[in-house]
Image: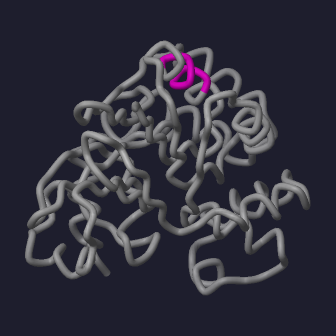
Amino acid sequence: MRVAAIYDIHGNLPALEAVYREIRQAGVDQIVVGGDVVPGPMPRETIDYLRAVEIPMQFILGNGDREVLARMRGEETEWYRTVQEQWREPVRWNAEQLCAGDEKWIAEWPATLRVGIPDFGDVLFCHATPRNDVEIFTRLTAEERLLPAFKGVDAGVVVCGHTHMQFDRVLGQARIVNAGSVGMPFGEPGAYWLQLGTNVQLQRTDYDLAKAAERIRATKYPQAEDFAARNVLAPPSEATMLEAFGKAELR
């Protein structure tokens, strides 16, 4: 059995299309979408694409999905009240692009998911950590700081995302793997994902970045130019984000 984990798509349909082509070629049996399908520049198109995928697929809720869902319901979360307008704007715009059917569908996504994979046993999928969808940690986070976030987890492998950087590390008796980001990577440009089969395979898919940037700029997304430039063509480096996340980890 082969399972693909795709996280943090963030409405980047060209990246998702490229990853799905590779997933089909790899003969994957099941896909887990690990949260943050939205917000991003092509939310309507991305959701329609995912709904049409032929391979069996399960979803979990990410913090971005949750914030967009709240706006669709007219709810104002603490995050939305306190963050800068530049972060509220894409959430608000994405909520306006979706419909009542999308709201009902996204609301059904669980916070975590367990999938049995023969060579690994039960694998736990979460967005950030098993206890919530916003905690930040990286491959450099000290084990003693990280252990409380995984207390009580009995799965041998835990797959997460949220920080948009791949890693594979051991924490106590568990193996913690970050699938990276399909649509908003930190590091070398491309689309990052994970395959679980007889082993753990961290994957990176190349796609036509210039064409993708052009498609994104052609949308009405209010931050289309910035997304194309900073999230597709020239993402922040891993070193830059490790330093930034180091100041915010597990808070």
Judge whether residue 118 is colored magenta: no
Q: How many marks can you see? A: 0
Look at the image and give the residue range highlighted in magenta: 17-22
Residue 124 on image: x %, y %? 37, 59
Write the residue at 31% across / 41% down. Answer: 118
Residue at the image position 55 percent from the left and 27 percent from the top: 15
Q: Nearer the viewer, residue 167 or 79?
A: 167
Q: With 117 as the anchor, is 224 left or right in this view?
A: right
Q: Nearer the viewer, residue 25 or 37?
A: 25
- Residue 197 in view of the camera: yes
The chief SS type of the magenta part is helix
Q: Is residue 230 visible?
A: no
Name of the residue lying farthest toward the right: 100
Relative image position of residue 44 (x, y in whole percent): 80, 42
- 45 on left or right of 208: right
Residue at left 40%, top 33%? 192
Picture layout, residue 199 above or below residue 22: below
Image quadrant in which you'd find residue 136: bottom left
Residue in the foreground of this view, choosing between 237 and 137: 137
- Give the quarter of the figure containing the C terminus: bottom left
Q: How is the image coloured?
A: one colour
Residue 69 in the image: state x and y as whole percent: 74, 68
Q: Between 211 and 119, which is closer to the camera in this rendering?
A: 119
Q: Left or right? Give the position of 58 relative to 156.
A: right
Q: Is residue 3 left or right of residue 152?
A: right
* Magenta stretch encompasses residue 18: yes
Q: Position of residue 225 (x, y in %)?
A: 64, 36
Q: Quadrant of the N terminus?
A: top left
The furthest residue to the front: 118
